[in-house]
């Protein structure tokens, strides 16, 4: 069981192949919004928002009436956000698919991990307790959302400089 916010110690104790259940508040974002969040971090404007990344989880998904399901984390805009987000405190990036070896190494340097989640939208709907629009409403379902979740299933795919891919 992994509960947010994730401590440095909890992140350090996660290993590839480990099956986890995630509970607490997580952020949802994909290719349209993650570069915008990175710009807020880089400019220092993140401090003037309601976005709190220390110990957080970023789930690579959009939020729609149909539910949530992972998108490919290796997309340029998504994988390109890992380093900035990890430096800002994100401890777990959650999506699907392989990421580059250099991203795996960087995650280790930042004491962060990457986990994959099966595309089980129906199951995740039952485990999503609350949904809140946090930033960039003009992006519609690709805006930055925060979910309160209980027992989201995931598998650690990259940790300690190693990957299951």
Image (cartoon, rainbow, N blue to C red):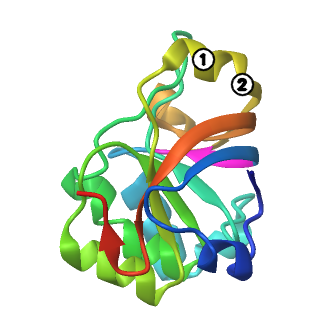
The percent position of residue 136, horizontal first and vertical second, equals: 54, 44
Q: Which residue is depicted at the point 48% across and 20% down?
A: 120
Residue found at x 22% / y 50%: 75
Q: Where 26 sits versus 102, above or below?
A: above
Give above or below for 20 relative to 108: above
Indicate whether 36 appears above or below 31.
Answer: below
Q: Is residue 164 above or below residue 88?
A: above
Q: Pointers 1 and 2 in contact (CB under 8 A)?
A: yes
Answer left or right for 50 relative to 96: right
Q: Which mark is residue 94?
A: none
Q: Which residue is mark 1?
A: 123
Task: Please give the range of residues in magenta.
Answer: 25-29
Magenta stretch containing residue 28, yes or no?
A: yes
Residue 105 at x, y = what percent? 31, 82
Left or right of 149? Residue 77 is left
Residue drawn 51% across the image and 18% down it: 121
Side of 13 where 149 appears, left or right:
right
Image coordinates for residue 60, horizontal then vertical, percent: 44, 44
Q: Which of 12 and 18 lies nearest the eye of the viewer?
A: 18
What residue is shown with label 2?
A: 127
Is residue 84 found inside the magenta-colored segment of the image? no
């Amino acid at each position: 069981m992994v509960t947010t916010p994730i401590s440095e110690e909890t992140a350090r104790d996660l290993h590839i192949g480990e099956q986890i259940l995630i509970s607490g508040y997580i952020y949802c974002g994909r290719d349209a919004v993650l570069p915008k969040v990175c710009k807020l971090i880089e400019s220092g404007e993140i401090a003037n928002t309601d976005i709190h990344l220390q110990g957080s989880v970023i789930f690579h998904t959009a939020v729609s009436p149909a539910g949530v399901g992972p998108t490919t984390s290796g997309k340029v805009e998504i994988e390109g956000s890992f380093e900035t987000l990890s430096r800002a405190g994100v401890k777990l990036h959650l999506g699907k698919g392989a990421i580059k070896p250099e991203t795996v190494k960087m995650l280790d340097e930042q004491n962060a991990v990457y986990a994959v989640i099966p595309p089980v939208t129906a199951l995740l709907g039952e485990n999503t307790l609350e949904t809140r629009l946090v930033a960039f409403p003009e992006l519609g379902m690709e805006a930055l959302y925060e979910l309160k979740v209980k027992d989201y299933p995931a598998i650690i795919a990259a940790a300690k400089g190693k990957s299951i891919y």
